[in-house]
């Protein structure tokens, strides 16, 4: 049976509105309803939750009016249909408007959005390209042609970045910034996309853009990769909070609810799935003492169908999805559950919903894992840490107070599945040669650290460097930098991404993992140590630049966490020239690593619970 589209269905008018609706239709047909009155009545219908009626009112008006004002009504109709998710109907309306006025840039830009929402990405890009290339100077409905061309360029760059077409996206960002330097969101993406491509120096000026503008508009994630200066990281987080996070003056939501019985812990995240956070946390949820605690997941993780996500959900007492709920509704729901301790596993990372925390649905709100840095969020008072990642000199740059765990801040999963160990030939490595390795994301690779790696390779004859091949441009840029430093391309090997079990098995072929700086390995360091492979790390001034050092201390290899780049190079060269030393670290990890405090998850969970309970009961 054919199903009618929404525009074909008989319109259902609530009984209370039927008389008014009939009069409106009479006025429209008789052309007695002027455009300003039409817009007012449509806005009233939308405010009352009758968006479909507002759209049909506009549709009737444009069908009975052939004045120049019809163009504005068509544009508004497209906006209504778009807001209702009727993207195909909105597309048709915008095309109708463009047939009347081909240089109607607002309609062309919005048409691109409708095509994107229908999954027609190439058509969306072409539509935005037409808007960006338009030479019209005409203004219509208060929007300048210049601003609309910039908007089209921004949309193209965003979509191309999502599609991992990084060089094309960067070229569009550069074109946009050359037209107008003062575009904070474009500047932010420009810096990070250069990091993803290992395009050094990252801060490359464009047009009138200054280095200061690049620095001040660097995202927090990009700043964590760029500098270990805790003051810069705090500044970046505070700027985000000032610009993006809701300013809530109402009393905290948790004050409305009486909390009693077992302590209720809520975990807040969009990453409870196949994600770094999802790989580190399952045992926390599984090991919570149910005689003392009740465990909730408040998540907006899409269903990825993975065994990892299913395991996480099984470990919860309650899984409460937040998809489709506004931040205010989500906060109200969390508060109504009587949560004592709300653990935010997201921070300011991609997909975060900090406005939930700003409403304070729980009396104790704690940051953990997702953002190993200060978030500066006014709704987060605590952060889980240890005394290595948060030494006293770091505390002035952190808005949260530390909850210090006894050994290491980072949780682990002792049940992670591991694939069969491959041969060197199977992963494309030669049979001989000391294998240095770094499987961190390419945006963590910095020019100073990569140059150090090249000097290490040059000083260790026959050695090779095994890297993650995140994208073709990053690979090309790394090979070009190696050539500039006199290192042959055949000494660099690039691994494609692999399923988690196979990725873990690869570590057994590496002799020494070389950590990144200032954005240390987190989950990756945990993985390599679990697999019995040593990692050499450089510890800096910030939480995130001390992560791997914390893990190494907890596993019993503190000498592999050094404090200067020169020491890092000397240690890597010494180990590379003495392969037996790397093997001794491997023997130590094989015999003692998994029984070390780093992987003592029952102890970590009891430690965490004791501190949560103390904080929660003090606030009841």
Image (tube, rainbow, N blue to C red):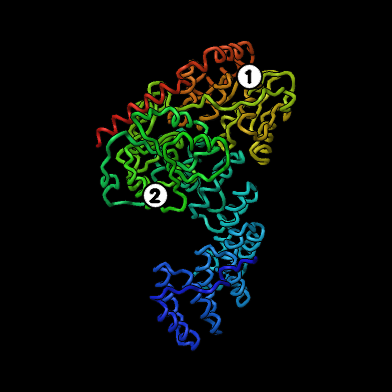
Residue in the image at 73% along x and 27% along y: 428
Identify whether 350 is placed above or below 159. Answer: above
Task: Out of 3 and 522, give the one closest to the viewer.
Answer: 3
Query: Where does residue 207 sit, x and y in percent of width and height?
Result: 56, 53
- Left or right of 512? Residue 603 is left
Instruction: Please say whether residue 441 is visible from this viewpoint.
Output: yes
Residue in the image at 60% along x and 76% along y: 101
Q: Which residue is the extreme one toward the front? A: 1
> Which residue is denoted by mark 1 in the rendering?
511
Q: Name the quadrant of the N terminus.
A: bottom right
Query: Where does residue 264 sit, x and y in percent of width and height?
Result: 34, 36
* Mark 2 residue crowding within 10 angstroms, few (<14) / some (14–19) / many (20+): many
Instruction: Please say whether residue 141 is visible from this viewpoint.
Output: no
- Residue 581: assigned label: none
Identify whether 363 is placed above or below 187. Answer: above
* Mark 1 residue crowding within 10 angstroms, few (<14) / some (14–19) / many (20+): many
Q: Looking at the image, tell me whether mark 1 or mark 2 is earlier in sequence order.
A: 2
Residue in the image at 52% along x and 16% along y: 593
Gap in angstroms between the C-alphas marked 1 and 2? 47 Å
Q: Name the quadrant of the C terminus.
A: top left
- Residue 330: assigned label: 2
- Left or right of 236? Residue 381 is left
Query: Where does residue 108 sit, x and y in percent of width and height?
Result: 59, 67
- Circle 1 sits in a helix, a strand or a loop, which is it? loop
Query: Where does residue 424 sit, x and y in percent of width and height?
Result: 72, 23
- Circle 2 sits in a helix, a strand or a loop, which is it? helix
């Amino acid at each position: 049976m054919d199903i009618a589209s929404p525009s074909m269905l008989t319109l259902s008018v609530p009984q209370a509105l039927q008389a008014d609706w009939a009069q409106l239709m009479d006025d429209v047909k008789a052309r007695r309803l002027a455009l300003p009155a039409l817009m007012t009545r449509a806005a009233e219908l939308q405010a009352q939750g009758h968006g479909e009626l507002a759209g049909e009112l506009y549709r009737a008006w444009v069908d009975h009016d052939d004045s120049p004002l019809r163009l504005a009504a068509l544009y508004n109709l497209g906006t209504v249909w778009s807001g209702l998710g009727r993207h195909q109907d909105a597309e048709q309306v915008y095309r109708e408007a463009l047939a009347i006025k081909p240089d109607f840039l607002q309609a062309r830009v919005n048409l691109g959005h409708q095509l994107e929402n229908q999954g027609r990405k190439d058509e969306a890009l072409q539509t935005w390209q037409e808007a960006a290339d338009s030479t019209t100077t005409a203004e219509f409905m208060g929007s300048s042609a210049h601003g609309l061309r910039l908007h089209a360029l921004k949309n193209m760059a965003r979509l191309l970045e999502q599609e991992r077409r990084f060089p094309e996206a960067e070229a569009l960002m550069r074109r946009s910034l050359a037209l107008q330097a003062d575009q904070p969101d474009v500047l932010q993406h420009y810096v990070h996309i250069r990091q993803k491509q290992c395009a050094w120096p990252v801060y490359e000026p464009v047009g009138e853009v200054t280095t200061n503008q690049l620095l001040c508009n660097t995202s927090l994630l990009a700043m964590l990769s760029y500098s270990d200066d805790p003051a810069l990281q705090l500044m970046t987080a505070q700027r985000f909070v000032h610009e993006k996070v809701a300013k809530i003056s109402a009393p905290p939501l948790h004050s409305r609810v009486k909390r009693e019985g077992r302590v209720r812990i809520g975990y807040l995240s969009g990453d409870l799935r196949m994600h770094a956070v999802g790989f580190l946390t399952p045992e926390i949820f599984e090991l919570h003492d149910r005689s003392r605690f009740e465990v909730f997941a408040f998540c907006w993780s899409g269903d990825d169908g993975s065994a990892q996500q299913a395991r996480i959900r099984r470990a919860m007492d309650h899984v409460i999805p937040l998809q489709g709920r506004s931040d205010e509704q989500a906060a109200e729901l969390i508060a109504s559950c009587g949560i004592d301790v709300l653990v935010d596993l997201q921070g300011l990372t991609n997909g975060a919903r900090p406005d939930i925390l700003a409403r304070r649905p729980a009396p104790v709100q704690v940051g953990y894992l997702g953002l190993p840095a200060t978030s500066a969020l006014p709704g987060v008072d605590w952060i889980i840490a240890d005394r290595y990642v948060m030494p006293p000199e770091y505390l002035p740059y952190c808005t949260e107070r530390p909850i210090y765990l006894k050994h290491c801040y980072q949780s682990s999963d002792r049940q992670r599945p591991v694939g069969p160990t491959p041969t060197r030939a199977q992963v494309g490595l030669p049979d001989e040669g000391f294998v240095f390795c770094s499987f961190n994301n390419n945006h963590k690779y910095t020019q100073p650290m990569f140059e150090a790696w090249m000097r290490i390779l040059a000083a260790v004859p026959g050695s090779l460097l095994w890297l993650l091949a995140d994208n073709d441009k990053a690979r090309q840029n790394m090979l070009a930098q190696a050539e500039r430093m006199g290192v042959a391309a055949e000494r660099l090997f690039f691994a494609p991404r692999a399923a988690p079990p196979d990725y873990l098995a690869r570590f057994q072929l590496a002799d020494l993992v070389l950590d990144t700086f200032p954005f240390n390995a987190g989950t990756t360091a945990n993985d390599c140590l679990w697999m019995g492979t040593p990692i050499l790390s450089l510890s800096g001034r910030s939480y995130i630049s001390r992560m791997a050092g914390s893990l190494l201390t907890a596993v019993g290899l503190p000498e592999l966490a050094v404090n200067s780049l020169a020491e890092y190079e000397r240690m890597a060269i010494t180990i590379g020239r003495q392969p037996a030393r790397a093997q001794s670290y491997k023997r130590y990890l094989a015999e003692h690593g998994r029984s070390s405090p780093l992987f003592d998850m029952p102890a970590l969970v009891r430690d965490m619970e004791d501190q949560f309970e103390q904080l929660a009961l003090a606030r009841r």
